[in-house]
Amino acid sequence: MALAQAAERVAAEFEYTKEDVNLGVKEFMRQMDEGLQKQGQTMSQIPTYVTAVPNGTEKGLYMAVDLGGTNFRVCSIQLHGNSTFSLTQSKVAIPKELMVAKTSRELFAFLAKQIELFLKEHHEDHYNSHLERRQSVFGPPTDEEVFSLGFTFSFPVQQYGINKGTLIRWTKGFDIQDTVGKDVCALLQREIDNLKLPVRVAALVNDTVGTLMARSYTSPGKTGTLLGAIFGTGTNGAYVEKLDKITKLKNMGADAGDVDDSTGEMIVNTEWGSFDNHLSVLPDTPYDHSLDAESNNPGVQMFEKRISGMFLGEILRRAIMSLVADKSVPLFSDEDSSKNDVHSTTHFAPNSPLHNQWGLDTSFLSIAAGDHSAGLKVTRQTLDHDYGVSAASAEDAEAVRLIAAAIGKRAARLSAVAIAAIVLGTDKLKHPKDIATTNDAAVNEDEIVDVGVDGSLVEFYPNFEEYIREALRDVPEIGVWGEKRIRIGIAKDGSGVGAALIALVADKAM
Ligand code: ADP
């Protein structure tokens, strides 16, 4: 088969039609509701106990720490009250032995020590005056002297209150059995108190909630952000839900005092990576199927496995390798397809990373899909330098580009399913009676639905947002009219400024 034709056939397998989008949105809305009602559903819909989003006028000095993988980050954030902030930060690698320590204390004492070093270096006055006060007759510090801290902890936790949550299990190379089932905020506070630091762990923060808060503080409008979404290594979203729709809250062991019902709303962390794990509506090409079967967690995170940076490169690698395995298709080869031993003169090195699981990075999709160089020179050079394919032809590169673009576009359209379902499920688009006549109408600021996004995929994959928008227009309840009202903006630094804002909200709720 001719190469171009074969590549088109594979690319077509990734088509995700208007009908698919609409089926996806309906099912997403159904699974969202299910998760709000009962625990242990496909979509976790975790209540965060954060009941308000900022409007940009918040002020004050807060701290944030982030434990999520290889590094521990400590920051202080000055919120200026005009949608801007200044951030000071330090970052330190977590010593490997502490990731697998015998006791929680060893790790959390190290974290508290880093907070102490940070305070001494960047907030010396505050630290010293606190020391003096401790040694004087004036007694313990007053509330104003204590920094409120937002603790971004990117591991699975069962949250019981704004600063209470027990570790379900460690991931990402951490393994300290002693911590499982314990309240991680209390563990950190105990070590902070041991060092007598003027710091209160005010909030336990999930990174998507941080993204939502950071966007809401910095976004140009004052309507408040609806949704914070991450499209990076993984994908997940958090949104503002009506408190009375989170019916499972009653059965979750939250103390009545833990739920502030003054706003009637609460941010919910969807954990949408596991949307439709049973594949009732998600697409399932042979490449998706084998990726999942050979992963270390088959059957879970099925939505994430079709969208996020950790997986798109692997989907493309499998699609490419299926063409390489097809002896009738002349990919990465000089030979004409009419000859028998097509791959005998292949330019494909036996030790190419493309032979290995996870051997193709998702950043390659951005390179190929965005390649406008003559004869796709940039893609060919990348194949050569990074992937052991020497002298790939323009036809080879075009075949790879076509498939990469199809995978990227499908990921964006699937992302739109989540965004559309949340916009519609929360009833944020108030439709005028006759949509058709108002397609061209100017958009008022108070009609804007704001969405904050973060992650390399949405930031760097060419036209990711435009593909999302195309799919949003494919949903009749949104259409051209609604799509124009959805504003999507990058929200940087959710685990810094976002966590600080959650600490602020937590202080107010006290
Ligand atoms: P994280 O989600 O871990 O905080 P990122 O948002 O940077 O960090 O996401 C990292 C993921 O993004 C990796 O899976 C990587 O393969 C992918 N990635 C990195 N650069 C790009 C790019 N230019 N285009 C698309 N994906 C990228």
Image: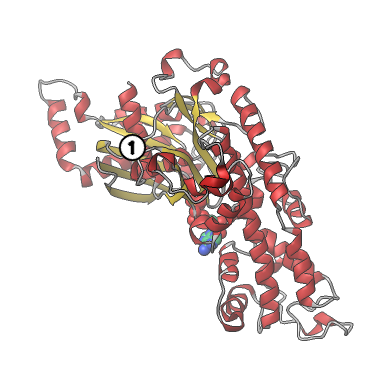
Residue 60: image x %, image y %? 23, 36
Residue 100: image x %, image y %? 51, 41
Residue drawn 56% across the image and 65% down it: 366
Amino acid type, label 1: Asn
Q: Is residue 335 left or right of residue 51?
A: right
Residue 14: image x %, image y %? 72, 58
Residue 316 sits in quarter: bottom right
Q: Is residue 159 left or right of residue 328?
A: left
- The foreground one among 376 and 474 is 474
- The foreground one among 394 and 91 is 394
Q: Quadrant of the C terminus?
A: top left
Q: Is residue 172 among the parts visible in the rendering?
A: no
Instruction: Estimate how packed mark 1 is, as few (under 14), some (14 to 19) or many (20 or more) residues with alpha carbons within 10 Å.
Output: many
With respect to residue 198, does 119 lie above or below?
below
Residue drawn 77% across the image and 54% down it: 285
Residue position marked by numbered label 1 in the rendering? 55
Residue 265: image x %, image y %? 45, 26
Q: Quadrant of the N terminus?
A: bottom right
